[in-house]
Image (spheres, grey):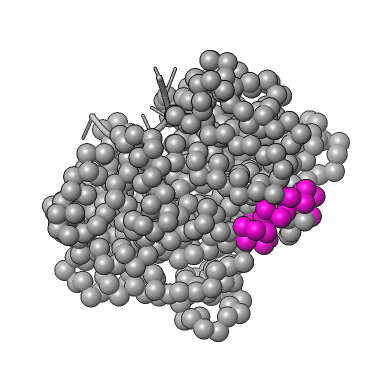
Amino acid sequence: MADLASRISNPSDTPANEAAAPAAGSGTGAEQPVDDGIQSGLIEPTYEVEVKLSDLQADTESPLGSGVSSFEELGLPKPILDGLLAMNFKKPSKIQERALPLMISDPPTNMIAQSQSGTGKTAAFVLTVLSRVDFSKPTQPQALLLAPSRELARQIQGVIQQIGQFCENLIVNAAIPGSISRETGVKASVVVGTPGTVMDLVRRRQFDVSQLKVLVIDEADNMLDQQGLGDQCIRVKGLLPKTIQILLFSATFPDKVMNYARKFAPNSNEIKLRHQELTVKGISQMYMDCPTEADKYDVLCKLYGLMTIGSSVIFVRTRGSADEIQRRMEADGHKVAVLHGAYEGANRDALLDDFRSGRSKVLITTNLLARGIDVSSVSMVINYDIPMKGAGNREPDMETYLHRIGRTGRFGRVGVSITFVFDRKSFEAMKAIADHYELDLVQLRPDDWDATEEKVQQVIKSSRAQPDYAPNVLGN
DNA sequence: AAAAAAC
């Protein structure tokens, strides 16, 4: 126990790797080391790039090290460049710079790409998809993108439509429950959906997959690993043209899944990160030492004021406790929204839209929203229940932890995560997560509220200019 | 024992 506590550090301590960084250009607000790190580009990861040239590429010029520093250099069509500009994408992020030349080159090569949360993976694969679509065949499906949840599929659809807003005749369908008409079927060049609905449409012959050129699987480790989702992805792939280009993306690729991913997408180029490189520097990770489980609820209510400075997401283990905590908080006068998979589709869409627009500011949810969801106003993530996995939920879920806290601190912004621990099991899970990612966690105590407020506010209130690669997705 | 995802 004392071991974790000994890792306590003040958020204002300057991380060792920032000491050697060049001074930030901006004068105001430069006191915050968190900002300094971002402004000097330190959130950009050190990539371990391992490029495997396919046989087809072997006699062509090596793409190794051929990163681009502007979108123009990629030779993308003018309408796509205009779309990027309209979305405030001014220059490629690290992952875009590295992955795009490899993905859009001919002949098409598979890709397994890993990059931290909020670093622009979506735009990277969306640009590849748009570069492969023949817009003269607007209702012929040419690209398929799969995501693990309805919410993420809809979000990706929105990003495609935004980046492709100046592409004439671009039609994007969402293959999620209730969105494709039974009479007409899929009538689009780009389809983004969840595996079950996609399978269903193909079986009913309402989705012609014969001309698909590219398959993207977002949150690929989750999609390929899980019983159910994994099976469905394999079945979908079995229906597609054998020569299709396969792109797998995620912030996490545990070794176990990586081996499987390589079979799913053979001869891939690979962009990987070491697990110590996965954490986003702009996210101040803290844990709250609660005496008992019952105390977690009281602490949550006390945090409400801090949660509403920006927007916040509260993660719990079950749908039932999500509903229960909302009921109690509403009764105690705190306005909170709930979103989980038990709700009906249109309701889910409306709930997330409300959160995106700021009509609701505190959202309590399950692992449904752990991955991929991009709402830039989220400045705090609460792990009310620490994520666990495995038989009997006895193992800490390293990957889910990383994805959950990645709902904040997106595209160089700052954010706070607070994980509640209350007993030996949760404490040791937190310690295992800290050791795995080599985290310096800030300890918060329920009995020292002034210190908690100060530590959290120090991060959240450090307003600063957005970096020039921060996109403006979906009107956030 | 969870969450998600199909009719």
Residue A442's spot in the image, x, y percent? 33, 65
Front residue of this view, candidates A428 and A386 = A386
* Res A321 → quadrant: top left
The reply to whether residue A265 is in sight is: no
| Front one among A14 and A242 | A242
User: Whole-percent x and y of residue A204?
Assistant: 53, 15
Residue at image location 73% in from the left, 30% down from the top: A137
Closer-to-camera residue (A444/A245): A245
Furthest residue toward top: A204
Q: Answer with the quarter of the image where residue A300 lies.
A: bottom left
What residue occupies the far front of the structure in this picture?
A: A183
Region of the chain picked out in magenta, as a range: A73-94
Task: Left or right? Give the position of A51 relative to A55.
Answer: left
* Residue visible at 61% across and 44% down in the picture: A160
Inspect the magenta stretch and tell me whether residue A83 lies in it. Answer: yes
Q: Is A8 part of what is drawn in magenta?
A: no
With A171 as the anchor, is A371 left or right in this view? left
Residue A195 sits above or below residue A372 on the image? above
Residue depicted at 66% across the width and 46% down the height: A164
Q: Is A180 drawn above or below residue A321 in the view shown? A: above
